[in-house]
Image (spheres, helix red, strand yellow):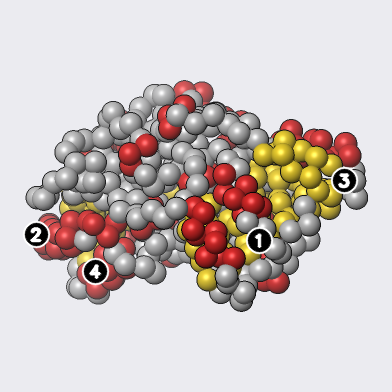
Amino acid sequence: MMKHETNTFSPVVADWKRFQDWGAHLGEDALKAYEGTAMPMGAYIDLARERGAEIVTPVAAEAMPAGMVTTEAYNNLVNPILDAVREGVDCAMLDLHGAMVSEVTPDGEGTLLERIREIDPDLPIAVTLDLHCNLTDKMVSNCTTLIGYKTYPHVDMYEVGMQIGRALLDSMEGKVDPVMSWGNVPLLSQTLCQGTDDEPMATLIRLCREAEQEPGVLAATAFGGFALADMKDSGNSVIIVTDGDRAQADRIRDRILAKAWELREDFIYKHSPLEERVAEAKTMTDGPVILLDHADNCGSGATQDVMTVIAEILRQDLEDVAVAAVWDPAAVQEMQKAGIGSKITLKLGGKSDMPSIGEVGEPLEVTGTVKVLTNGEWTVHGPMYTGVNVFMGPTAVLDTGNMEIVIVSNHHEPWDIGVFTSVGIQPQHKRYLVLKSRIHYRAGFAPIGKATLTLDGKGVTTSDNNLLDYKNVRRPIYPLDLINEA
């Protein structure tokens, strides 16, 4: 497992320590960390156990999305995998992301696969990729069979791992002959418009599921892509895997790509003034109302310390609010020194400049009581990353009276209610939940939320294309360029 979603506009460094903070496991530790989890790697392990195979787990490492992956981190991820291939394996099942940009290569996953093929040109290789993969020819041409998630939030990771792993094993036994057909459209769609319960993504997923009901279709995937990775192949793509029938794969691919292009306007987010949205929230009495600070979502590479949205919520005096989470290790240390029950005034957040969008960090002065101090460790029990241990680092809760703010030392996107329950907050009883998230929050919070509003604050996960200076993505591409034909 080797995962990183790279936001090339982010000032946060994706070094080896960042992977270690999430949990970078080598050898047997990798097996122990992910066996029994609802991850693609968990599925691969179960498939190998079914067959009594010897299991080699060189590495299992993931980092919260950030800027470009450093050379050291990339080599630490890739080299153990390459060493295992050199020592000799019968097949490789890889749990990857598909949007990794590193100092070594703009196509982290494709380069890994290419290097594996250089060592063993005939090795059977199965690959799972995130729905936000920016698919490349290098990825497709250097594996045997490939699939992506069909859900966002990603609650089907185990299922797609089983699906593509079984296809690979069947091919090794001569039961199927996988052929792949892929393509993309010049569409740089935005993550906020890629929720698979919503249109337009729901239509593309439906077409993929219908395709998989056709005889001979082994897998069908529509990728939303990750527009915040400024690399040539960013954008929407489709890949179809069939049992030996390339014409069938081409036909299905073209049908789904045509639909993606037809729906292109629906993949672009429409903005609203922040003050108006917060005022609208204030009129809502049936909670919890989920307020998304989506431009500062560390799950897409943001700094998670922009205070714009929180400041406006405090200014308009919303009551009974819980926030998850603000990244500010220094503030946590101050609260630890003060101790539980102490009243404290902090210059919270605003520690990070964001030169790519011309913003300087602006701390917000807040006064409150130190309510909770923890080590930030808990286990996910919700439907996404089920069974995976979370390490938020030293964590504190500041109670301002109207607002309880969870403050963390490691970046963590709130996709599970454990971000609150681990520090003693019962989110289902709050009037407002401010989440620095986009769509993944739905995995844990959709069952308890009575309404959701997107709040357009500041941050490097902005959906405002006018703020982003693209240099590497292929042009022309919609909506950066107003083109009418794919």
On screen, residue 197 above or below 221: below
Disc 3 residue crowd, few under 14, some 14–19, many 20+, Cα 10 Å: some
On screen, residue 240 above or below 27: below
- Total numbered labels: 4
Three-letter amino acid code of the residue under disc 1: Leu
Q: Which mark is residue 343?
A: 3
Disc 3 from disc 2: Cα separation: 69 Å
Disc 2 from disc 4: Cα separation: 17 Å
In the image, taking residue 472 as reference, residue 399 lies left or right, namely right
Three-letter amino acid code of the residue under disc 3: Lys
Q: Which mark is residue 389?
A: none
**Residue 110 image-quadrant placement:** top left
Kindly state the secondary structure of the residue where label 4 is placed: helix
Of the two numbered discs 3 and 1 in the rendering, the one whose residue sits closer to the viewer: 1
Of the two numbered discs 4 and 3 in the rendering, the one whose residue sits closer to the viewer: 3
Question: Is the residue under label 2 in contact with that under label 3 (CB below 8 Å)?
Answer: no
Disc 4 from disc 1: Cα separation: 42 Å
Kindly state the secondary structure of the residue where label 1 is placed: loop
